Amino acid sequence: MTLDKIKKLREKTGAGVVDAKKALEEADGDEEKAIEIIRKKGQAKALKKSDREAKEGVISSYVHSNLKIGAMVKLYCETDFVARNSEFQQLARDIAMHIAAMDPKFIKPGDVSSEIIKKEREIWTEQLKKEGKPEKMLHKILEGKEKKFREESALLTQPFVKNPEITVGELIAEKVGKIGENIQVGGFVRYEL
């Protein structure tokens, strides 16, 4: 592997020299494959660190240029050292901007209450019956609609506004792999005039 390729991959991913070199070797020099390998390793690291307590962090905000939409997010990490890290703080700002733009209602899909799902299912059932969908297909269609509704309503499963190819949860997992600490969203609020 050439040093230029390793340097370029490091600039794109933030990976260390050794990780970038290994990823390029594993991908036979293919930069796109190497990026994917680094992303997957970051998600694996995130899973290993997910049970560690995150009690430090920052509160970050974003106000849209029209001054009519704003959001605040509480982002936790394990140490105050990481909380002061510019990359962690930028992540918090990016998530606050995402919240302002995409208006999630919950942190994760499992946070959607059964009452909300029950009401939505009633609406969907009526719509499907009006469309003339067969009764035996309703259950499967409703399951799909519920899954989609939960994912679209939850911050962590929404496509990230600055890069829709990944979700906010995947973005956080990448940062966990890069920074080396557990990162969790503690809560958020969005305001709109």
Image (cartoon, helix red, strand yellow):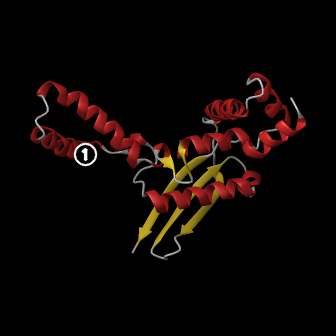
Counting labels gives: 1
Q: Specify the amino acid type for callout 1.
A: Glu
The quadrant of the picture occupied by the C terminus is bottom left
Q: Can residue 154 be seen in this view?
A: yes
Few, some or many C-alpha atoms within 10 Å of disc 1 (few <14, some 14-19, many ≥20)?
A: few
> Residue 170, located in which quarter of the rendered image?
top right
> Residue 110, located in which quarter of the rendered image?
top left
Q: Would you say 92 lies left or right of 2 here?
A: left
Q: Is residue 180 visible?
A: no
Q: Label 1's element? A: helix
Q: Would you say 107 lies left or right of 2 here?
A: left
Eyeballing the image, is 16 above or below 158? Answer: above
The residue singled out by tag 1 in the image is 115
Front residue of 192 and 163: 163
Residue at (80% x, 32% y) in the render: 19
Q: Would you say 98 lies left or right of 138 here?
A: right
Front residue of 80 and 188: 188
Eyeballing the image, is 179 above or below 57? Answer: above
Horizontal and vertical percent for residue 18? 84, 32
The quadrant of the picture occupied by the N terminus is top right
Residue at (66% x, 35% y) in the render: 39
Residue at (18% x, 30% y) in the render: 138
Horizontal and vertical percent for residue 133? 14, 33
Eyeballing the image, is 37 above or below 168? Answer: above
Horizontal and vertical percent for residue 80? 73, 54
> Residue 169, located in which quarter of the rendered image?
top right
